[in-house]
Amino acid sequence: MASIQLNNVVKKYGKGKQELQVIHGVSADIADREFVVIVGPSGCGKSTLLRMVAGLEEISGGEISIGGRVVNELEPAERDIAMVFQNYALYPHMSVFDNMAYGLKIRKMPIAEIKQRVDKAAGILELGHLLDRKPRQLSGGQRQRVAMGRAIVRQPQVFLFDEPLSNLDAKLRVQTRLEIQKLHRELGITSLFVTHDQVEAMTLAQRMIVMNAGRMEQFGTPEEVYNRPATTFVASFMGSPPMNLLNHAPNADFGGKPGTILGIRPEHLQIGASGWAVQVETLEMLGAERLVYCRFGDEFLIVRTDESQATPGIGATIHVAPRADRLHWFDAESGRRC
Ligand SMILES: Nc1ncnc2c1ncn2[C@@H]1O[C@H](COP(=O)(O)OP(=O)(O)OP(=O)(O)O)[C@@H](O)[C@H]1O
C-alpha cells in the first residue's frame, strides 16, 4: 500500500533577503495505485514538488508521507520510489541489460533474481531483443522505455515521472503515453507524473493537480477540471483554445452580477440567427473543425464550429448564442468559481 500525502508542503530557496518561496502550502491525498498528474506552466513549481517527494530537494515546511510513513528526513534511497527523468539518464557505456540491472546489482541482489526481474520488465516493455545494445544504438522512444524498465525492476512503491515524454516527437509521445497507461494498468503502482502539456495531463491522469505560481489551483479528475474549473487560471490553462472569459459585455444578459466574469468554452457557442452580435476577425481551418476569432465590443471571443455550418467571412457580423447550461461564473477579484 503506498498512498502519498502532501500536507501543507512549502519550499523556499535561499536565505534572508535572497529568500524565494516557490511552493506555498500544497496539500493533497493521493490514493494507493492512483495515477496523478501535476500540470502547470513553466516555473509553477511542479518539478520542485516532485523532487521533494523523491527526496532530491529538502522540504522547507509541512509534511510528506509515503505509505503512511513521514519521509521528510529520509534519503531518496530509503523512500522506496523510482524516478524517470526527461533526459533518461542512461549509462552510455553499459548495455540495455546492464542499465536496467545496475540499481539491483549495487543493492547486491542475487544475479538470478536480477535476470528474472530484467527479463520480466523487458517483456512488458518489448525490449527483449535490444538487451545487448548500447543506448546510442537505440531510438529516443526505446531509450525512454529502458529508463522506465530501470524503474520497474526496482519494484518500488511509487513511480515519479518528470516530463519523461518531452524529448520525443509527437507520434512517439502518443505511443509512449499509451504504453505508460498500459504499464499502470498492469502494475498498479502509485504514480506522480509531471508535465506542462495539458493534453498529456488530460489523457493520462486519473486525477490531476493544476499548479500556478507555486499554488495548487485544483485537484480533480480530468472531467471535473475541464467541466468545472475552480478558477479562471484553470479555465484558461486547460482546453485549447482556452475558455472565453468575458468581463462585462454580456453579463447582464444572463443575470450576471457586477464583479463576475462569465466563462464559456468555444465549443459551447452556436452561430445562428440570434444571440450576441460579434465581428469576425480571423479564421483558423483545422481540418474537421474551424475556429472563428471574433471581436465582441472591447472583448474577444473564440467560437469553435465544424463543417456542418457555413464558414462566415472575415469582417462579417454574425450572431452567436452561448449554451445556457454551459456557463461558468467566476469572481472577478479572486478568480474563483462562484
Ligand atoms: N535551486 C534553485 N534555487 C532558486 N530557485 C529555484 C531553484 N530551483 C528552482 N527554482 C525556482 O523555483 C520555481 C519553480 O521551479 P520548477 O523547476 O519547480 O518549475 P516547473 O514548474 O517544474 O518548471 P519547468 O516546467 O520550466 O521545469 C521557479 O521560479 C524556479 O526559478
Image (spheres, grey):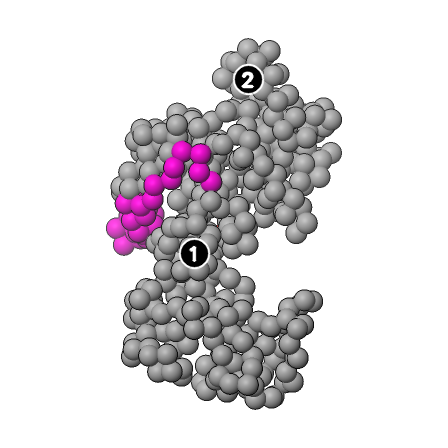
Residue carrying label 1: 225
Identify the residue under disc 2. Answer: 105
Which residue is at 71% across, 35% downward?
A: 138
Secondary structure character of the magenta stretch overall: strand
Place of residue 44 in the rendered image (x, y in percent of width and height, measured from the top left): 41, 54
Q: Secondary structure at mark 1?
A: helix
Image quadrant in which the C terminus is located: bottom left
Question: Is 285 left or right of 189, judged from the image as shown?
Answer: right
Q: Amino acid at mark 2?
A: Lys
Q: Residues within 10 Å of mark 1 (few under 14, many from 20)?
A: many
Image location (x, y in percent) of residue 127: 68, 29
Look at the image and tell me whether residue 104 can be seen.
yes
Residue nearer the viewer, 178 or 193: 178
- Please tell me whether residue 30 belongs to the stretch shown in magenta: yes
Which numbered circle lies on residue 63? Answer: none
Q: Quadrant of residue 111?
A: top right
